[in-house]
Amino acid sequence: MTSTLSRAIAHYPNRFDPGVLSELPEHLQETIQRRNKVLGPGYTLIYREPVEFVSGRGAHLIDRDGNDYLDAYNNVPCVGHAHPHVAEAVARQMTAVNTNTRYVQEALVDYAERLLATFPEELSRLSIACSGSEANDLAVRVARFHTGGEGIIVTRWAYHGLTREVASFSPTLGAGSPLGPNVRLIDAPDPRHVAPGSTLDEHMRQQVRGAIDDLERHGYRLAALITDCAYSSDGIFTDPPGYMQAVVEEVHAAGGVYIADEVQSGFARLGESMWGFSRHGVLPDIVTMGKPMGNGLPISGVVFRPEVCEEFGRNVRYFNTFGGSSIPVAAGAAVLDVFEKENVQQRVLESGNALRAGLREITKDSPYVAEVRGAGLYVGVEIVKDRQTLEPDRARAEDVINDMRDRRVLISGTGTSANTLKIRPPLAFDSADVTRFLETFAEVAKNRL
């Protein structure tokens, strides 16, 4: 059947093609047709055959027919779907009160103190919003106010959010969402881009220096470099640690600030530390967080060095009705409880190491797998037509993704050519989940890789 993909979603990884709607089971057709009549523009379903879930627990989702799917894709329910401790904390707060930050809330102060205790002591001020987009929007507003600059540097296929401001420096949104004239793009830290005789540190330094020079040539002073510490949309590049020191030096020398976007890489996602930037031994000026903070409830955060945000606070009123309200804060506090009680970071390290080791063993002889990379429970498997040329193979990657879905294991794709498998489960992913994942992946690999 002829594809009816719109320009807006043509590049979206692993998206459902509305042109094949008539080939779906009848109940899915009916629900999707109803959905199309009532929802606004821009919504996207994923997988060749979309799936409907009615419940979940841990790293598992259950469809309407009672089938158990292993979720190796959804990072938002950080400590697991329907975690009982988080659910109980939210329900308890809902029966008490839900007020905002214009009123004294001891629970809000307690939560802020606990969360900030996971950061270096220099990062000691927290603002709370509702989404990662809002957090990055506020971070850039503060950066501009503090530096007096307008220039923004991001990686070539970065995603930082959907507000009008943040969309202007989220190149992965595509041609329908143009970049601002004050935005410059640099390479993601892929060691394969480094020239012989150079280092990743020097390569990244030169990228940033060139972007700063070009901004200045066009009349823009640097406000901020903002990076996702896992480079999630660029294709997942987490190693080797350490190159960020050179990058941050260049940013500070130009009078800018470094914003670490931890929406995807934070909360021990990368295993060795609570925050992705810590792996590089750098101190950001601003850190942003998203909905994993509340296990999926609408809460996000921005953490500042005080000297960066204080003048902004004296001159600009910031308020968010729901940011910092009682119910999302209860969820956030419950998530921190789970981290402490379940030793989540250690589980991420162990499960992540086993997962990557297993994937490397399964794919070691495949001519179609360029690399298995990542850290903790954020893993990328790059699918190519040939290991020598590294030509991307999006079609094969999508076949793998959909074969996994047909076997009830959920993953997705990422990267500039959408040819890197994105494996990013809830942090409840345990050793039994790793075993199931690898057994299923090995079955798919026999046919596809």
Image: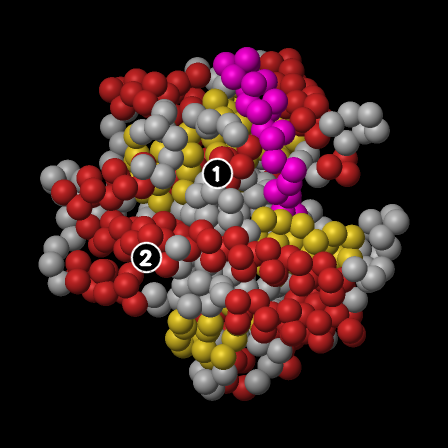
Mark 1–mark 2 distance (CA, rounded to whole Å): 26 Å
Q: Point out residue 39 in the picture as x, y percentages from the top left corner.
A: 43, 64
Q: Residue at x 50, y 40 (%)?
A: 276
Give the labeled residue for mark 2. 341
Q: Point out residue 370 in the picture as x, y percentages from the top left corner.
A: 78, 53
**Chosen colour scheme:** secondary structure
Res. 321 in view: no
Q: Residue at x 70, y 65 (%)?
A: 398
Taking 204 as reference, is 90 left or right? Answer: left
Q: Point out residue 338 in the picture as x, y percentages from the top left corner.
A: 33, 57
Which residue is nearer to you in this view: 48 or 63? 63
Residue numbers of the magenta segment: 234-255
Give the labeled residue for mark 1. 261
Q: Amino acid at mark 1?
A: Asp
Query: How many numbered marks have been drawn onto this rendered protein structure?
Result: 2
Check disc 1 and report its element: helix, strand or loop.
Answer: strand
Q: Is residue 250 magenta?
A: yes
Q: Amino acid at mark 2?
A: Lys
